Amino acid sequence: MSNIKKIRTTEGDLSIDYNSLDNLPTIPSKVSDLTNDSGFITKSVSSLDNYYTKTEVDEKKVEVTLNGASVSSPSFYAPTTAGTSGQVLKSSGNGAPVWGSVDIDAKEDKSNKVTSLSSSSRDTQYPSAKCVYNYVNEINDKFNYTQEEQRIGTWIDGKPIYRKIITKTSFTVGETTNTHGISNIDFIVNVRGVGIRTNGEQEFLPTIVPPSGMQSYQMSVYDVTKTQYRMYMGSNTQTGNQKLVTLYLIFEYTKTTD
């Protein structure tokens, strides 16, 4: 017993003083000195009332709330395939959802769909794509100039107004009578024109009657009827760099066919 430094005897019993032993182990005095390898709660709590037991947690794993009521072990339906791009889940009528396409046409309320727009159109109506296309083209036509007859608006009597451009490149000095070639004219709304000279300058019709001595530069269109028009070209409009080379006559009119 070489590790025993002191032995006391009391009434025949052997008593050893623990602190007198060599190589005594260090005994932790605080819980924080220990390794928390079991994951015990490390924060101070005054009550465990707000903590679930393991059994309670396991029960909560299979409990959900449906329509405001707690249900244990509920059943859910899921599609059996992944479906394809663009499809949506739809009810099969027997619980399990299925993938399918949406029939947009069947969802459309066609009762308020219109194919034309007018002053009698209502706020609850909506136009078809073709209606919008026609309406946009009608607006564009009012600003487009072409040698083809095109509708550009409506006259005060409700009839459509048409426009057609006639191009002239041959001219005769003096008065001439010319046919415009437009069929079924009912009412002439407007006639105007623009000419181009050899030097690039432009001349606009109708022109104001020039002062005395300048009539040789006059160019005008008048006496327009449903089949023809009269034109006057001064002598100087066909000579030198003032010579008129092209004239665009713009006719706007309604038709007997409407």
Image (cartoon, rainbow, N blue to C red):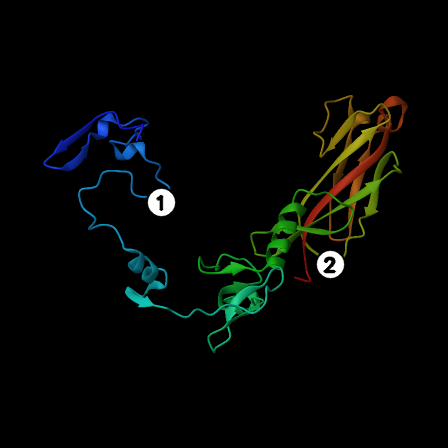
Camera-nearest residue between 106 and 206: 106
Write down the quadrant of residue 57 in the picture: bottom left
Instruction: Point out the frontmost of discs 2 and 1.
Output: 1
What mark, if any, has residue 156 been given in the picture?
A: none
The amino acid type, in three-letter code, at marker 2 is Asn
Write down the quadrant of residue 230 in the picture: top right
Camera-nearest residue between 254 and 207: 254
What mark, if any, has residue 184 been given in the picture?
A: 2
- Give the x, y percent position of residue 135: 61, 53
- Give the x, y percent position of residue 38: 35, 45
- Give the x, y percent position of residue 21: 27, 28
Mark 2: secondary structure = loop
The amino acid type, in three-letter code, at marker 1 is Ser
First reached walking from the N terminus: tag 2 or tag 1: 1
- Give the x, y percent position of residue 73: 37, 68
- Report the side of 192 relative to 89 (left or right): right
- What residue is drawn where x is 17% and y is 34%? 15
- Looking at the image, residue 36 lies above or below residue 197: below
